[in-house]
């Protein structure tokens, strides 16, 4: 029972696990692997082909586009999913800002999950995360395009 409580907490704290039962979260976590990156180490480079989705379990990650920080990720954040879903090169470089523990699923593991009902919820959550990012980006673009106010 103690383990199910742990998986329930993961489901509450990790956006792409929202709405999944503790058993479903356990199932997903047992199909991927946990990897570690020391501070300053690169997880992947912009332009690389990628087949892994990552979830930050501890530490902090920065995403860079053309050497500029575009996001600093905190525990629970998912990243790398766009390259897996659209089969295009990575659009950013990911670097550990602090020692980081990551959960990762590769495309083969994701595809095996897609044969399960849990995959529907996982994909809907990924879509939700991506739509929130798009909404934030659209708001930023609108703000940047707004004419400067005269004092």
Image (cartoon, grey):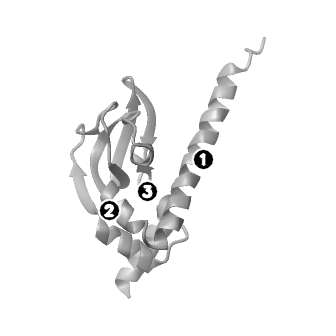
Pointer 2 local density, CA inside 10 Å: few below 14, some 14–19, many at least 20: some
Q: Nearer the viewer, residue 25 or 6?
A: 25
> Which quadrant would the N terminus be assigned to in this image?
bottom left
Q: Position of residue 96 (x, y in %)?
A: 29, 42
Q: Residue at x 34, y 68 (%)?
A: 29
Q: Residue at x 44, y 52 (%)?
A: 77
Label 2 vs label 1: CA separation? 25 Å
Please, which residue is most extreme toward the top here? 150
Determine which residue is flagged by label 1.
132
- Rendered image quadrant of residue 104: bottom left
Circle nearer the viewer, 3 or 2: 2
Label 3 vs label 1: CA separation? 15 Å
Query: Is residue 139 rendered to the left or right of residue 115?
Result: right
Q: Position of residue 100 (x, y in %)?
A: 28, 50
Determine which residue is flagged by label 3.
76
Q: Is residue 106 visible?
A: no
Determine which residue is flagged by label 2.
109
Query: Is residue 101 rendered to the left or right of residue 110?
Result: left
- Which numbered disc, 3 or 1, marks the residue that appears first in the sequence? 3
Q: Position of residue 14 (x, y in %)?
A: 47, 61
Q: Nearer the viewer, residue 57 or 43?
A: 43
Q: Position of residue 95 (x, y in %)?
A: 30, 38
- Which numbered disc, 3 or 2, marks the residue that appears first in the sequence? 3
> Which quadrant would the C terminus be assigned to in this image?
top right
- Rendered image quadrant of residue 40: top left
Against 143, residue 106 (above or below) is: below
């Amino acid at each position: 029972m103690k383990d199910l409580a742990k998986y329930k907490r993961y489901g509450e704290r990790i956006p792409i696990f929202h709405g999944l039962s503790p058993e479903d979260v356990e199932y997903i976590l047992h199909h991927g692997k946990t990897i570690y990156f020391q501070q300053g180490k690169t997880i992947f480079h912009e332009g690389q082909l990628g087949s892994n989705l990552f979830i930050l379990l501890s530490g902090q990650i920065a995403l860079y586009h053309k050497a500029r920080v575009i996001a600093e990720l905190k525990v629970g954040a998912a990243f790398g999913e766009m390259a897996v879903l659209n089969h295009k090169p990575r659009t950013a470089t990911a670097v550990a800002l602090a020692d980081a523990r990551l959960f990762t699923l590769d495309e083969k593991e994701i595809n095996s999950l897609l044969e399960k009902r849990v995959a529907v919820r996982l994909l809907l959550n990924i879509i939700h995360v991506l739509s929130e990012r798009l909404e934030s980006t659209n708001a930023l673009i609108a703000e940047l395009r707004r004419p400067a106010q005269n004092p």
